[in-house]
Image (tube, rainbow, N blue to C red):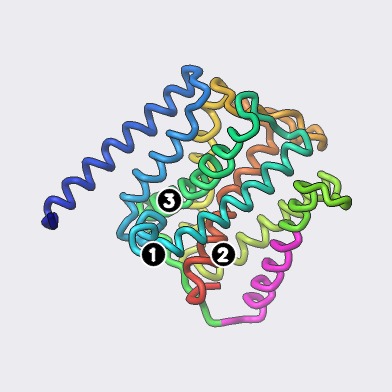
Amino acid sequence: MKLTREQRFLYTRITILIANVLWLAFAFAGLKGFSFWYGGFVLFFWLAFGLLNYTYKSSVWLIHKKVWLFLILYLALAGISYVADQFGVNNHLWFYPLYRGAGMLWVWLVLYPFAGLAVLELLYFLGGYLGEPLSFRERPMTKWHGFFDVFEQVLFLVVTGVIVTGALRLGFEVALPITTTLVILWLGVALIKLHFHIRHLGHYSLVILSTVLLALLSHELPNTVAREWVYLEAPLSSFFNVMLLGLPVWVWIGWFWLVLLPLRLWIFLVLHPRVR
């Protein structure tokens, strides 16, 4: 049975409403101490905002129209999430009190990749809400544009390689303070590179900062009660372990990485070759 345009609109709006109620319910459950809150939260958050962003052709549109391309993006997120998680566990940055063995597949195949997709949808939603929908494009190449394009790619590969060696314990591991420095450097270079593919710098900066703040608060604060994962003191300088709203500074910095990584993969894998 083929639905009319009005029926599709109505059913979509009903789905969005239900998904919004459910992600809010899971977040509330986390604040009440329900330990397995995060999977439902990220899945319904991604669905709700993805449907709202459908006209922007973001990830929910992609799974509907180009499922194989979506699978490539999903596998990239899952793979990088796995090595990043192993890196953190090996460096005693966090642990999972509730997951063991095969249960970790839920963490690696659902929690992390769909958290990345949820963050991507939040970026698109805030861009539209703030009056500057994310529109990526290739500007005329300049020397600085070319420099940051190349430098960011090299730095991204270096950071990824460092995280992989730390995750897999390949015999050569870069010290955590050096890794942290490289990640912070990549964040700065990636922000500059993205500026060459965004229309307005002011709106772009506001969208990025708003996404980091809202994603961190919504994804992390319920867990300070539920404790589905537990953060430990990082073997870094005392500054990185200062607590802000119940979370150490290094987690706040980490969320900049967690916001820019899905966006970086989205531009490279999905929008490529229109935007590199």
Viewer-proximal residue among 264 and 196: 264
The residue drawn where x is 58% and y is 39% is 105
The residue drawn where x is 49% and y is 39% is 214
Q: Amino acid at mark 2?
A: Leu
Q: How much space separates mark 3 and mark 1, taking CA atoms?
A: 17 Å
Q: Secondary structure at mark 3?
A: helix
Viewer-proximal residue among 19 and 187: 19
The earlier-in-sequence mark between 3 and 2 is: 3
Q: Position of residue 143 (x, y in %)?
A: 66, 80
Q: Position of residue 204 (x, y in %)?
A: 49, 58
The residue identified by callout 2 is 194
**In which quarter of the view is residue 159 placed?**
bottom right
Give the extent of the magenta segment: 141-158
Q: Position of residue 222 (x, y in %)?
A: 51, 26
**54 left or right, relative to 190:** left
- Which residue ends up furthest to the front in the rendered image? 102
Q: Height in image: 159 above or below 95?
A: below
Q: Height in image: 79 above or below 151?
A: above
Q: Secondary structure at mark 2?
A: helix
Q: Amino acid at mark 1?
A: Lys
Q: How much space separates mark 3 and mark 2, taking CA atoms?
A: 17 Å
Looking at the figure, which quarter contains the N terminus?
Answer: bottom left
Q: Does the stretch in magenta take in 156?
A: yes
**165 left or right, relative to 231:** right
The numbered dot on residue 89 is none
Q: Amino acid at mark 3?
A: Glu
Magenta span: predominant SS is helix
The residue identified by callout 1 is 66
Q: Rate crowding at label 2 as few (under 14), some (14 to 19) or many (20 or more) other CA atoms within 10 Å.
A: many
Q: Secondary structure at mark 1?
A: loop
Q: How much space separates mark 1 and mark 2, taking CA atoms?
A: 25 Å
The residue identified by callout 3 is 121
